[in-house]
Image (spheres, rainbow, N blue to C red):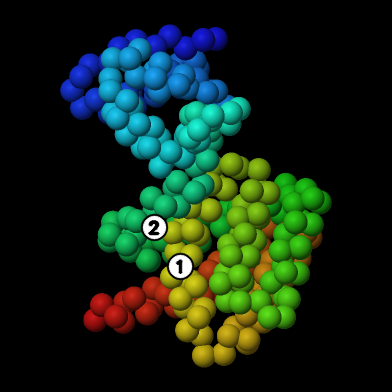
Amino acid sequence: MTAEWRPVRQSRTHELVLESIEERVLAGELKAGDRLPPERELAPTLGVSRSALREALRVMETIGVLVAHAGRGPDAGARIVRNPDDALGRLLRLHLALGSYDLQDVLEARVTLERSSFEAAARRASEDDLAQAEQVLARMREPGLTVAEFNELDTLFHVLIARSSGNRLISTLTSAVRESVRTLILKAEEDAEDWTATAAGLNAQHAELLRLVRAGDGAGAADLVEEHIRGFHGTLVDDRAEADL
């Protein structure tokens, strides 16, 4: 189905452009993978300036529903996509920094989400899912791994388990919440008195979590991941509380 484009009102132009595009997505006229018309065509069709159109497109990129490539060729132009994980993670990280949520809120949300995802993964994870998670854990045990590399792989492990749960929304929310505190967790890891022992302890818990998921023990995996999160993430909450005193 070809989307029918109509001029928009001139007040708060870029927001009206967003509304126009959103209407077409909600109506099913635009779907993931569809390309928008070139700026030189879309701007006059909507009755707006190209600068207002670009502003609207930049907002859509930020919220993870559009990707734009400049230049010529088959990849040039703006295309509707589905990329909620990065966008939500960025949004939560900013609001956490601004004080919209405190670390205790994030901790409790993460516990709730990951208990659910690990329990579901124990029932639904495929052998391929488990093999990918095992590969990540093997990389986390490699000698010479930097703290930053460990942190990235740690995040990936938890996201992979969330994805294997079969619930895409829980996966996205888990990824976003974990990403929102990734830099804080990295800082805590870098400040650890004995990083070698800390990494070994975290790896042991990760290995046991994967064993429980593989064995189909959802309740055990849920309990352990809560202990795992409260053990390290919980220190961030305690440290922030002490700093605020």
Q: Is residue 60 left or right of residue 28?
A: left
Determine the image quadrant of residue 21. top left
**Image vertical order of residue 165 relative to residue 211, above or below:** above
Residue placed farthest to the left in the image?
11
Query: Which one is in front, 216 or 11?
Result: 11
Visible residue check, residue 23: no
Q: Residue type at mark 2?
A: Arg
Could you tell me residue 27's position as x and y percent?
45, 16
Q: Is residue 241 shown left or right of residue 222?
A: left
In the rendered image, the quadrant that contains the N terminus is: top right
Most distant residue in the front direction: 72
| Label pair 2/1, CB-CB below 8 angstroms | yes
Residue at the right extreme? 127
Please give left or right for residue 101 compared with residue 70 in the image: left
Relative to 147, is 142 on the left or the right?
A: right
Q: Residues within 10 Å of mark 1 (few under 14, many from 20)?
A: some
Name the secondary structure under disc 2: helix
Q: Which residue is mark 2?
A: 93
Which residue matches tag 1? 183
Three-letter amino acid code of the residue under disc 1: Thr
At a point 28% along the width and 59% down the height, the residue shown is 98
Numbered circle sitting on residue 12: none
Query: Spatial distance from mark 2 to mark 1, Cα to Cα?
Result: 9 Å
Query: Is 46 or 142 nearer to us in this picture?
Result: 46
Image coords of residue 46 (percent x, y): 32, 15
Residue at point 60%, 55% (across, down): 159
- Vertical placement of residue 214 versus 123, above or below: below
